[in-house]
Image (cartoon, rainbow, N blue to C red):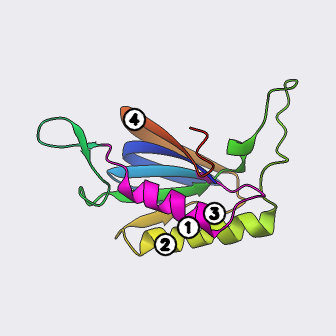
Amino acid sequence: MRAIIQRVNSSKLYIDGEIYSQIKKGYLVLLAVSEDDEKKDLDYIVKKTLGLRIFEDENEKMNLSIKDVEGEIMIVSQFTLYGDARKGNRPNFMKSAKHEKAELMYNEFIELIKNEIEIVETGKFGANMDIELINNGPVTIQLDSSKIY
């Protein structure tokens, strides 16, 4: 499982030109599920997402978590995080989970985050979405449950 976490001042997600969801200060989480992912991968990404200390404390050090700042989270499915472009110019998405598995794990991720964070918004699985965000910092963190980075 992979996640790109962007610390944002705000984010809006549009479907068909209409606002579908929006958040204020918090995270925009782009989430991808691989064909090999299991419950342990899901648990790892949830724990890391909630535990990351990437908000500044009173000394301007990144030392506070999303929970510490009572931040909001927007979660968006993005299978392209498993795009492999090492050969040629057209990415290969063979490592991405099939639709049914990906949607199931995406929804489980959302529910686990909702157990810990008051305001959680989402995209619509499989939809064509436009995302507007103000990246704070900018701070962008990559997570991978296979711990390749």
Image location (x, y in percent) of residue 75: 52, 58
Q: Quadrant of residue 47?
A: bottom left
The answer to whether residue 22 of the structure is visible from this angle is no
- Which residue lies at the image location 51% right of the left edge and 74% below the top edge? 111
Q: Which residue is mark 3?
A: 124
Say what amino acid the circle numbered 2 marks: Leu
As drawn, 22 above or below 4: below
| Separation of marks 4 and 1 at Cα, in angstroms | 22 Å
Q: Which mark is residue 118?
A: none
Which type of secondary structure does the marked residue at label 1 adopt? helix
Rendering quarter of residue 37:
bottom right
Disc on the earlier residue, 3 or 2: 2
Foreground residue among 20 and 121: 121
> Of helix, strand and loop, which one carries label 2?
helix
Disc 4 residue type (three-letter): Val
Question: Which of the image's four quarters has the C terminus?
Answer: top right
Write down the region rendered in magenta: 31-54
| Distance in Å between CA atoms under marks 2 and 4 | 23 Å
Q: How packed is label 4: few (under 14 Cα within 10 Å), some, or many (20 or more)? A: few
Label 1–label 2 contact, CB within 8 A: yes
Q: CA distance from mark 1 to mark 3?
A: 14 Å
Name the residue that disc number 4 marks: 139
Residue 53 vs 77, above or below: the answer is above
**Marks 1/2: CA–CA distance:** 5 Å
Secondary element at image label 4: strand
Which of 130 and 61 lies nearest the eye of the viewer? 61
